[in-house]
Image (cartoon, rainbow, N blue to C red):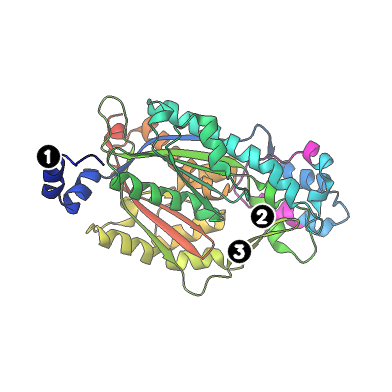
Amino acid sequence: MAPVPATAVAVAAATSTHEIRRAQRADGPATVLAIGTANPETYVSQDEYTDFYFRITKSEHLPELKDKLRRICNKSGIDKRFMYVTEDVMEAHPEFADRNLLSLDARVEIASKAVPELAAAASAKAIAEWGRPATDITHLIFSTYSGVKAPSGDRLLASLLGLRPTVCRTVLSLHGCYGGGRALQLAKELAENNRGARVLIACAESTLIAFYGPEVGCNDTIIGQALFGDGSGAVIVGADPVNAVERPLFEMAFASQTTIPDSEHAITMQYMKGGMDYHIANGVPEMLAGNIERCLVHAFDSVGVNAKWKDLFWAVHPGGRKILDLIEEALGLDNGAMAASRQVLSEFGNMSGTTVIFVLNELRRRFEANGAEGADWGTLMAFGPGVTVETILLRVASGLKGN
């Protein structure tokens, strides 16, 4: 064995682990540098969805359930939803209409290709906006409930985008509607603790994995069919933006996760032979509204900021119209405070964990169009199984204030 040079020994002795650790950390906060979104080509207007759904599932013999779905759709605040499920898909796979039939393998086979491809479409938009090559991505976080294979969709996504072989990949699975918030918090930790890291978040979902026909006595199916759609959102996060190359949009000042006590059965998801089974209990909107303020107080107290709720901008997961209504009421917010969330709900429905990225993009679009004068602090919040609440404190960054 060759002797270790004396200079190397001297350097090692003079450099403490703490000094190495400090050198690895970024100087500034994690920052949103680019956002991209994508949807399938096909969509159904909410006015037409009830007829579409009962036709393709051959469920016209259940008129009471059809009337119920139509009533929920009319009150949903949704105009249209994008989805992979079409009449052609259902003709090829009639078993998808009956959750008691074995269909999980066929669903996974379709989703394992379609979902990463949808994620790649959103990610390509984010990378193009970012302005640096895809090979500069150091970390990939892929969040989905739509894939249960290994290698997972992150492997295919990395290949589709041409990411470098050393990219560090992480999959978040079955986080449901809080997946986007969880991915953003993880990206924040990675960016701030790895100097120069550039983290690509990709969230993608398809209702195909949980699509089936109506059943008497199963309200979850009817509610879900009135709300959920398909989509993908991508965000690039990094600290210490490179001047003249990267455009900082939102700084991520603080992030936390809260689990509401005694709520583990309120929202559930489980893979079964006929696809993914889900349950949303009565009272979830009220539960969220009753706990939202303490999550906000904890977050702002942690950074020493005395915030007034009416002064913030809001990127809240639009799980449904009632959730937004009750949160606005609980916080004493003016009508229009959650306009970005309502706009996304109207145009796309609830796309699970992907949705909050669409809301963040809509906020960015509004700031670019109308200016960000007076905007400073804001909050991104997402909710899902657990019941889990993700809270991220945001500040408008220089890339938006310069508009």
SS of the residue under disc 1: helix
Quadrant location, the N terminus: top left
Which one is in front in this view, the residue at disc 3 or the one at disc 2? Answer: 3
Q: Nearer the viewer, mark 1 or mark 2?
A: 1
> Mark on residue 304?
none
Residue 281 locus on image (x, y percent): 61, 67
Residue identifier under label 3: 268
Residue sitting at x 65%, y 38%? 113
Residue at the disc numbered 2: 224
Relative image position of residue 137 (x, y in whole percent): 40, 34
119 in relation to 338, above or below: above
Position of 103 with respect to 171 (left or right) is right
Q: Quadrant of the C terminus?
A: top left
Tell me the amino acid under the disc marked 3.
Thr
Q: Going by the picture, which residue comes out furthest to the bottom?
A: 262
The magenta-colored residue range is: 68-89
How far apart marks 1 and 3 lie (CA) works out to 59 Å
Magenta stretch contains residue 256: no
Residue at 26 percent across and 34 percent down: it is 398
* In this picture, residue 115 sits left or right of residue 296: right
